[in-house]
Amino acid sequence: PVQRAGLKLAAAFAMQSSQSRVLVVCCDMPLVAAAGVGDLRANEALIPLYGDGASAVVIGSTLRSSESALYEYLAGRSEILPNTDDLESFTCSKEGVEISFSADIPRRICHKIPDFVDNLSMAAFGQHIPFDQMLWPVHPTALPYISMFEEACALDPDLSTMASRECLRKFGNMYGASLFFVLDDL
């Protein structure tokens, strides 16, 4: 949601003038949150899952002759699922940020994914786009989450979500910065 909000706001600013360019920078340091001020060795299990990272994109509304677009922002959508507030928690303390995710997240949300994506394709293109004809920049939260998208939408992991898997393998989950890494790999 943070990336979408940033992109949506940047697009709104860029639309004010065809010559405007807006730089969107995303920087996250999950290892600091995971380790806090304590000993990193205490969190050895977390270190391979998370990585610090930064990424940036430039948003404009009209291409200049010297520019080429990689992507076009057509539509964005967020949805809050009822009765899911118990699935994750973030607690700040002097040792850092304590993050807790329920193993039940994939099961509780996977049935919503196909309709969500279908509604988004209708908003962007005015028609249903078959899932196997879409690019899938899935946030590389963790392998079970990527697999959840593949399963829910009958996607081929070697084609549809390889960029997400590769980002997770190379860099870990860099929170917000991860999605721009996946887009760059697509």
Image: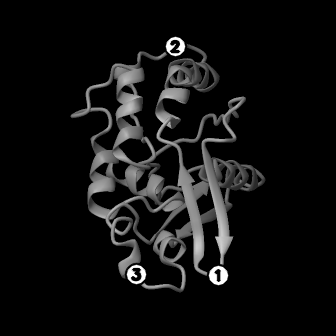
Choose between 88 and 22: the one closer to the eye: 88
Amino acid on which disc 3 is placed = Leu
Q: Which residue is mark 3?
A: 40
Q: Residues within 10 Å of mark 1 (few under 14, many from 20)?
A: few
Q: Which residue is mark 2?
A: 128
Under circle 3, the secondary element is helix
Determine which quarter of the picture holds residue 130: top left
Determine which quarter of the picture holds residue 149: top left
Under circle 2, the secondary element is loop
Q: Nearer the viewer, mark 1 or mark 2?
A: 1
Q: Is residue 84 above or below residue 63?
A: above
**Residue 119, how many percent across, how many down?**
61, 20
Amino acid on which disc 2 is placed = His
138 vs 170, left or right, is: right
Q: Which residue is mark 1?
A: 94
| N-terminal-most mark, 1 or 2 | 1
